[in-house]
Image: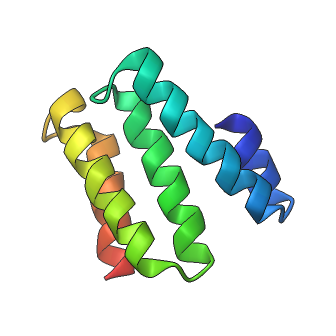
Amino acid sequence: NNLALLLEDKGTFAGAKALYERAITVGCEALGPEHPDLATYLNNLALLLEDKGTFAGAKALYERAITVGCEALGPEHPDLATYLNNLALLL
């Protein structure tokens, strides 16, 4: 996830996307599908997709991040507010 952020900052979007996707896969397998880190990985990939104009894909990822974040962190956690805000900005 951190390397993906670096690649995104450098404008290497295809490489960043692949690393975000890998982080999601590995995170889900290693940490479980309801771990809070997974919500962060989903949100980061959604931000990248939104930036590249893939709005439907970004929306689905934001929604999944919200679901995972709410279950893992609770409905009052500040990270959940970030995911909700990002979805609202997309819409």
Q: Percent position (x, y) of residue 16?
A: 72, 53
The quarter of the image holding the C terminus is bottom left
Q: What coloring was used for the rendering?
A: rainbow
Q: Is residue 20 left or right of residue 85?
A: right
The number of callouts visible is 0
Query: Where is 14 relative to 37, above or below?
Result: below
Q: Percent position (x, y) of residue 22?
A: 61, 38
Query: Where is 83 relative to 86, above or below?
Result: above
Query: Where is 43 relative to 88, above or below?
Result: above
Q: In the orientation shown, which residue stands out farthest toward the left?
A: 75
Query: Where is 72 relative to 55, above or below?
Result: above
Q: Is residue 25 left or right of residue 17?
A: left
Residue in the picture at 44% in, 79% down: 55
Residue in the picture at 23% in, 28% down: 72
Q: Percent position (x, y) of residue 58?
A: 43, 68
Picture quadrant of residue 31: top left
The quarter of the image holding the N terminus is top right
Residue in the picture at 37% in, 77% down: 89
Residue in the picture at 54% in, 55% down: 45
Q: In the orientation shown, which residue stands out farthest toward the top?
A: 30
Q: Is residue 28 left or right of residue 16?
A: left
Q: Is residue 42 left or right of residue 65?
A: right
